Amino acid sequence: MTLIDDKRALRRSMLAWRGDLDDEARRQAALGVLEMWRLERPVKAPAVVSGFWPMAEELDIRPLMIELVNQGCQVALPVVVAKREPLIFRAWRPDDPLEAGVFGTLHPAPSRRTVEPDALIVPLLACDEEGWRLGYGGGFYDRTLERLRARKDITAIGVGFDGQLVPAVPHGPDDQRLDWLLTDKRACAFV
């Protein structure tokens, strides 16, 4: 099998696993991630922190984003500009209206200012104990992290359900490692 085949197989497996979670497990996981953040605080306020609006069966980090705003952070949401391009980030506040983006995403309107994050909270399908992350396959976060890391120190924090921590994630030269993983049961800093 090739790297692409290995990633596709793990992606299918993790999508099926995540799809089987019930609503109560999802709600408890969202609260667990918030508690892990409060215990570990991988980013100190004030900072510009990119979150993400959950889609499909992704872990709901909206409670965490509200917590960050309350701590004095500027929260932003990612915007897909074009295929094979890095993401941009627009400032977000809890009551801001959102617009539909590509791939089923939601993001702030173009009237909201563009910001450059100090930390990115990154969705994932799987992560291993070395910090390698498996996403949906578009490479948006990998390109974005590579661009931002060339300019400044960035903290990349993968967020997911504890069952998304796997023994090994296939990775290649274009993949970017995470600095942290937060789940509903653990916080792991990768050195």
Image (cartoon, rainbow, N blue to C red):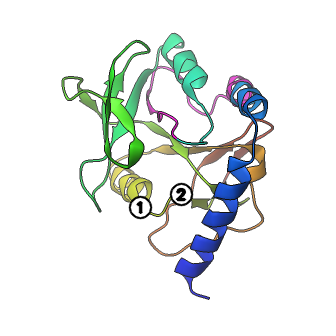
- Residue tagged 1: 138
Q: Residues within 10 Å of mark 2 (few under 14, many from 20)?
A: some
Residue type, mark 1 in image: Gly
| Circles 1, 2 touching at the beta carbon (< 8 Å) | yes
The residue shown at (57%, 80%) is 5
Q: On the rendered structure, is 114 left or right of 54? A: left
Q: Is residue 106 magenta?
A: no
Q: Position of residue 26 (x, y in %)?
A: 72, 33
Q: Position of residue 130 (x, y in %)?
A: 69, 61
Mark 1 vs mark 2, CA separation in Å: 8 Å
In the foreground, 155 or 36: 36
Query: Relative to 135, is 101 above or below?
Result: above
What is the quadrant of residue 62 in the picture?
Answer: top right
- Residue tagged 2: 135
Magenta stretch, residue numbers: 33-55
* Residue 127 can be seen, yes or no: no
Q: On the rendered structure, is 11 left or right of 114? A: right
* Residue 174 can be seen, yes or no: yes
Q: Position of residue 129 (x, y in %)?
A: 73, 59
Label 2 element class: loop
- Image quadrant where one finds the C terminus: bottom right
Label 1 element class: loop
Q: Residues within 10 Å of mark 1 (few under 14, many from 20)?
A: few
* Residue located farthest toward the right when viewing the structure as drawn: 185
What is the quadrant of residue 180 in the picture?
Answer: top right
Residue type, mark 2 in image: Gly
Q: Position of residue 20 (x, y in %)?
A: 74, 48
The residue shown at (24%, 54%) is 82
Query: Relative to 8, is 162 above or below?
Result: above
